Image (spheres, grey):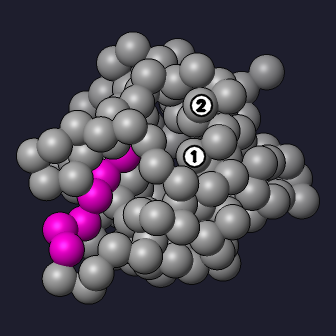
Amino acid sequence: MSDLVWDDVSEFFDPDSMGRLPDVSVPGVSVEGWQGLLDLVVEKGWKHQYVEGAAELSLPRAEVVLARPVEAECPSLRVWPEDGVLAIFRFLHDEVIDFDVDLWELQGQERLDVLCGFFREIGRRLGRPVLMDPEGCEGHPILGFDVEADRVVLLMEP
């Protein structure tokens, strides 16, 4: 059974009104939370690519990435939980996991189910909510993984 029904949430997946790259976050984490995410990526066998500057490197430990000098370029981790669905993680803060998804890739019930499954996996592993805000509107989540409900829920009325 799907967490969300496409017909009920499709307007929140309109790139023209919501922004193409909504902001997704997992608040209240630590270096251990980041490591939990990295371990999950490997355990699930999700295709991924870790990049620092122009160099593609092996996936390091979270404490190594998060201890980089302030002036260093921010590394990114690209994760494909399924072909055609990309999440781009940026190691900006120790206490918040930030990533983007592309709404052009998330059209229809099948792709919505992939996104919900991805959020559930992350939220369950970390025991934290996974919140999606319209692009540039941090703090106004439209949907997210609810830890207590153990599913992705709508947080804003259509």
Residue 48 magenta-drawn? no
- Labelled pair 2, 1 in contact (Cβ < 8 Å): yes
Magenta range is 72-78
**Crowd around label 2: few <14 · some 14–19 · many ≥20 (10 Å):** few
Q: Residue 158 location in percent, x, y?
A: 50, 55
Q: Residue 136 location in percent, x, y?
A: 27, 72
Could one spot residue 119 in this view of the protein?
no
* Residue sitting at x 68%, y 52%: 36
The residue sitting at the bottom extreme is: 70
Q: Residue 117 location in percent, x, y?
A: 65, 32
* Local SS, label 2: helix
Q: How many marks?
A: 2
Q: Which residue is mark 1?
A: 38
Is 147 drawn above or below residue 16 in the view shown? below
* Residue sitting at x 58%, y 20%: 45
Q: Which residue is mark 2?
A: 42
* Residue sitting at x 46%, y 49%: 60
Q: Amino acid at mark 2?
A: Val
- 59 vs 107, nearest the viewer: 59
Q: Residue 59 location in percent, x, y?
A: 44, 42
* Residue sitting at x 87%, y 53%: 149
Could one spot residue 49 in this view of the protein?
yes
- 117 vs 53, nearest the viewer: 53
Is 101 drawn above or below residue 91 in the view shown? above
